[in-house]
Amino acid sequence: MAKSRSVPDLWMIAATLGILAIGVVMVYSASAVAAFHDYGDAYYYVKRQFVFALLGVGAMFVTMNVDYHAWRKWALPALLVCFGLLLIVLVPGVGVVRGGARSWLGIGSFGIQPSEFMKLAMILFLARLLSERQNKLTSFRSGLLPPLAILGLAFGLIMLQPDLGTGVVMFGASLLVIYVAGARVAHLGGLGLLGLAGLGALIAAAPYRLQRITAFLDPWQDPLGAGYQSIQSLYAVGPGGLVGLGLGMSRQKYNYLPEPQTDFIFSILAEELGFIGGTLLLLLFLILIWRGMRTAITLTDPFGSLLASGIVGIIAVQVLINIGVVIGMMPVTGITLPLVSYGGSSLTLLLTALGILLNLSRYSR
């Protein structure tokens, strides 16, 4: 194993803190109008985001200094706890319904989203399992089927909430880990086709998902219904032009674009800061993903390499889908933009995961 470096990847730290700073500013800009209307306090959302950002950065610096090998022994207990939470959240009267999904546990305004924790727990478990079974991965039955069965069970529980967006992110990042571990491309290709068929069945089984697909193909068929968010998002992105309307000057946040501080926060950023501001944010994400993949590639420990790949996969898949939705390239899925969108569970957990990735960077060659 390569000797531990004295400091973690400074590029990664700079990109993470840069994205986080932009996120806090944009949460205030995007939410101030709605917060004042709903709560009489324009700082309602940003105060909470700032607190969670501080907690998350604290957790990031803790995990950055914890030897990543320690996570190996906690991989299975973490997975079992998350499975338990996913079952508990489905119990009527216990799980809290928000946005049409029973995805939360908590009291009042405080809550956690177990599916967010499952994303990281699944990556930890798969990294441990596959690093110990790499020589069996070429066999579908004995090598690939067991991790896929566990992944499928977790995905099924998340879909019962239902939360397709989080499930897709977990599944996509997990498949990246399985691929990096050495699974055969032919097996993964066949599973990909089967997955597309299953996704089609899930979409057809729920009328609102089918409406999102038809709205994606032509949002103007239902401009006040299923196509409303896509149209309003493009109304925000388009006028932004090269330099934007100016920070705080968005028009779409005045009750035109629903929940602008969460799924569609990039729309507000593009409207206010323009192409230049959007490109800067995407450049920071690219730096973060690049340095993360560099860490995964240069690690000699299979467990560490797979763990790094999975954490980077969570970020990359989530960014790709969120931006794709905002610019009309994908159907609306309800996926937030990492480190930028408002949300306590996702923000603190992702910063914790990035701390693990930063610790992994200490051991890269």
Image (cartoon, rainbow, N blue to C red):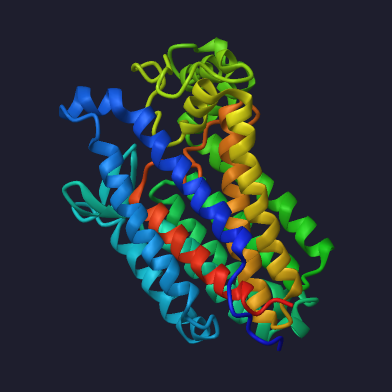
Quadrant location of the N terminus?
Answer: bottom right
Instruction: Name above or below for residue 50 compared with residue 273.
Output: below
Asked if residue 304 is positioned above or below residue 254 in the image, the reply reads: below
Seen at 29% across and 22% down, the residue is 33
In this rendering, the answer to whether 176 lies above or below 228 is below
On the image, the x and y values in percent for residue 130 come to 66, 78
Q: Where is residue 146 in the image (x, y as percent from the top left)?
A: 62, 75
Q: Position of residue 127 (x, y in %)?
A: 61, 75
Image point (27%, 44%), residue name: 97
Q: Residue visible at 61% across and 16% down?
A: 241
329 to 120, vertically: above or below: above
Q: Between 156 and 352, which is closer to the camera in this rendering?
A: 352
Residue at image position (55%, 85%) is 69
Whole-percent x, y for residue 354 in the image: 52, 63
Does the image show residue 150?
no
Residue 258 appears in view: yes
Foreground pick, 84 / 45? 45
Please state, as top left, top right, bottom left or bottom right, where the C terminus lies in the image.
Answer: bottom right
Q: On the image, which quarter does residue 217 sit in? A: top right
Q: Is residue 164 left or right of residue 288?
A: left
In the rendered view, does 115 fall on the left or right side of 213? left
| In this rendering, position of residue 153 left or right of residue 110 | right
Nearer to us in this view, 106 or 48 = 48
